[in-house]
Amino acid sequence: MIEILSRSRCIECNQCVNVCPTNVFDRNVDGVPSLARQSDCQTCFMCELYCPVDAIYVDPDPEKLTGVTELHVQQLGLLGGYREKVGWGKGREPVASHDFMYQLSLKTIF
Amino acid sequence: MSLNEKRLCVDVLVLGGGPAGAWSAWSAASQGATVLLADKGYLGTSGATAPGGTTLLVIPPVARLREEAVQQRLRAGGYLSENAWIHRVLDQVEQNLEQIEQWGYPFPKDQDGTPLRTHLQGPEYMALMRKVVRKAGVKIWDQSPALELIHDEHGVAGARGIDRLSGKEWLVQANAVIVATGGCAFLSKGLGCNVLTGEGLLMSSEIGAELSGMEFSRQYAPSFADGTVTRGRMLAWSTLYDAEDQPLLQGERTFSSIPELLMKGPVYAKMDLANTAHKREFLRRAHPIFFMPLERAGIDPFEQKFPLTLRYEGTMRGTGGLRLMNKECSTTVPGLYAAGDAASREKVTGAISGGGAYNASWAMCSGTWAGAGAAKYALAQSSRADQRKPTAAGQYGLPAGVESTDTLEIRPLISSIQAEILPLHINYFRSISVLSSALERLHALVPYLKATPPSTVQGKVQTREAAAMLMVGRWMYTAALARKESRGLQQLADYPEMDPYQTHRLLVSGIEKINIRTESVPHAHELSLLREERAI
C-alpha cells in the first residue's frame, strides 16, 4: 500500500493523481496531492513509476500500513528503486530491451 | 441533462484502457472512425498488463508447428476451442508485434539481429500504446469509468459515466461500443487487478448480451502473502516448506498442488534451486518486479523462506465473458463488441486458462478485430448517434434501481460477496452442495442493491463495482452448477470425469432471473471419436 508521498521532493505535477488506476490521490489547491483513499491502493507501484522525482514509496503489503518513514526508505535506497530496476526514466536503458525474459522462457517452458 | 455533464458524439466508443481497449481504439481509428476511449483509471497504468508484462503466443509460420500447437490446445481445452480461431490469432499476433516494433518498442535482438518478439514489459508496452492511440486521433478520457450503457430498439447507442477527478457526469453517444473492460477479479489484490470488477459484463447484460464460459473460473495465482505480485513462474526455482521447515514440494512448474497444501496449513517458498550467484543474478535481472516486494519486505528469497498465498483471478485468467458472434467480435446486441478478457476466450483457450501467452495475444487480436468491426458498423449507419433517442439501461447499484431510502453500505456488501467467491473451499474445491449454498447466499444479496448508493463520486463507482461483482459471481456459480462434469478449469467433486455429452458451451443471460442454455462447438465430434477408438 502507498505509504509515502514526500512533501519535500514533490514538484506538484499531479501525475500520480492522473495515473493512479484506483483513484487514491486527491489534487489539492495548495499543491502536494493528498493520499485521500489510501485503503483503495492496489499496490501496483504505477504511481512510483510515473513520479518524475521519486517522491513516492509503495510498501509491498497490500493489506496494512507498516508506518515506514521517509528517512528509513531513503537510507535503504528504496525511493525510486523500482524505476531504476526497470530502467524507466531519462538516460536509463529499459529492461524491455534486454533479452532476459527470452532467456528465461527458454529455461522454463510454460 | 444537467449543466454539469460532459457530452460527446463519436462513431466508436471504447470502454477500457488495457491492451484490448488500446488496440480496439487504434484499429477503429485506423478505419477512419472517430473514437473515444474512456477508462476507469489511466490508459498506460490500468489493468493486469501494465504493472507486469506478458509473454506472447508466437509460433513460427511453419504449418506443422502451428497445427501441433492447435491440436494440443484442442485436447487440453476439452475440445471447446476452435482451430480456425487459434490459427487466426497466430497470424494476427505476428502482424501486431511487427507493428509494435515499428512504433518503437525496443525488442531485444539475437546474435543475427533478428528481433525476439516474445515478451512485452507492461509499463513500456502500455506507455507506447497510449502514444500510438493518441497519434491515431483517438480522444482519451482517463479516470472516467462508464456506469451504464444507453440503447434503443436498434441496439447500443453509447454510455454514461462519471469523471472521477472532477465529479462531472458524462454522456457519450456512439453507434458502436466496444467493451474492453477486462475480466472480474473480485478485488483480490493481484498485481494491477483491482480495477477489474466486471462492470463491462453487467452493463452489457443489462442490454441483453449473453455470456459464455463463466464456469471456467477456478484459477488462483500464487503470490508472496505480504505482496501482490502474482508472477509465479519464479517458483519453479523454489522448494515449498511447511511451518515446521519440512520440504513439501520442489521445482514444480504448474503449482497445481498449492491449494491442497494451503488447506492444511501455511506454505512457504525458498528459491533454493537457484544455487549459484550466476543463476540468482540472472533471475533478479530477468524479473525485477517479482523480487522488488520481497526485497522491500527485507527478505532474500534465495536464502529465506517467504509465506505464499493464492490470489483469486476470477474471469481474468478464467476464460468466460461476453459471447462473441462472429469474426468481428460482435456480441448478441447490435453495435456492441467485446475484446480482451471481457470477451469469452473459449474460441482460443477452450475450457482452460488463457493465462500468459494466450490472453495477451488474444487482447491484441480481438482488439484489432473488434475495432475494425465496430468502425465498419458505425460508419455504415445512416445517421449519427446523437440523432437517436436512447434510454439508459443501468439498474443495479444505480439510482434507477433504487427502491429504498436506506443508504447502501458498500464495504459490507463487497465483503459478503468476497466471502462466497474468494475461499478455496468454495470456489476451488467445487462441489454441488457447497456451490449451491454459496449461490443462494449471493442471490440473497441482490435486494441490497435497491438501497440508495452514496452520493460521493467514489460511492457511485464502487456501488456499481459491487453490483457487477455480485452478478458475475452469480453467473459463474450458476454455470458451474449446470456443467455437471470436470473439464479444464471446471472441476466438480461430484462429477470428477469429463462427460463427452457435455462437449458444448454454456451460455448465461439475464440478471434477476438467470437463463442458461447450451451452444454446440465445431470440434465436439473429435472427442467422441477419440473415445470410440479407445473402446475398440
Image (spheres, grey):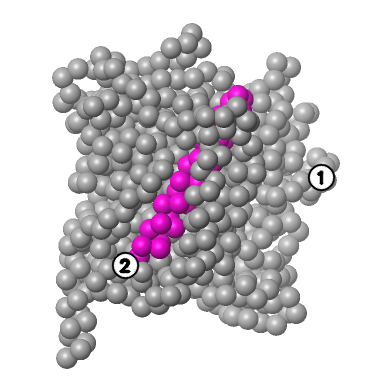
Which quarter of the figure has residue B158? top left
Q: Amino acid at mark 1?
A: Gly
Residue B477, placed above or below residue B150: below
Residue B536, placed above or below residue B168: below
> What residue lies at 21% left-to-right and 42% top-to-bottom?
B328
Question: Which quarter shows the C terminus of chain B?
Answer: bottom left
Which numbered circle lies on residue B63?
Answer: none
Is residue B232 visible in this depiction of the protein? no
Q: Secondary structure at mark 2?
A: loop
Please state if B364 lies on the left or on the right of B272 as rendered: left
- The chain that hosts pointer 2 is B
Between A74 and B359, which is closer to the camera in this rendering? B359
User: Over which residues does the magenta segment extend?
Assistant: B454-483
Question: Where residue B47 appears, x then y in whole percent?
Answer: 49, 43
Q: Which residue is mark 1?
A: A67
Which quarter of the figure has residue B276? bottom right
Q: Amino acid at mark 2?
A: Gly
- Seen from this angle, which residue lies furthest top? B3
- Seen from this angle, which residue lies furthest bottom? B536
Residue B462 painted magenta: yes
Residue B135 painted magenta: no
Pointer 2 with pointer 1, Cβ within 8 A: no
> What residue lies at 26% left-to-right and 37% top-to-bottom?
B333
Please state if B104 lies on the left or on the right of B423 as rendered: left
Between B430 and B373, which is closer to the camera in this rendering? B430
Q: Which residue is mark 2?
A: B77
Q: CA distance from mark 2 to mark 1?
A: 47 Å
Question: Where residue B115 appears, x then y in whole percent?
Answer: 35, 53
Question: Where residue A13 appears, x then y in whole percent?
Answer: 63, 23
Please state if B379 lies on the left or on the right of A22 as rendered: left
Crowd rating for badge 1 (residues with CA inside 10 Å; few <14, some 14–19, many 20+): few
- Seen from this angle, which residue lies furthest front? B404
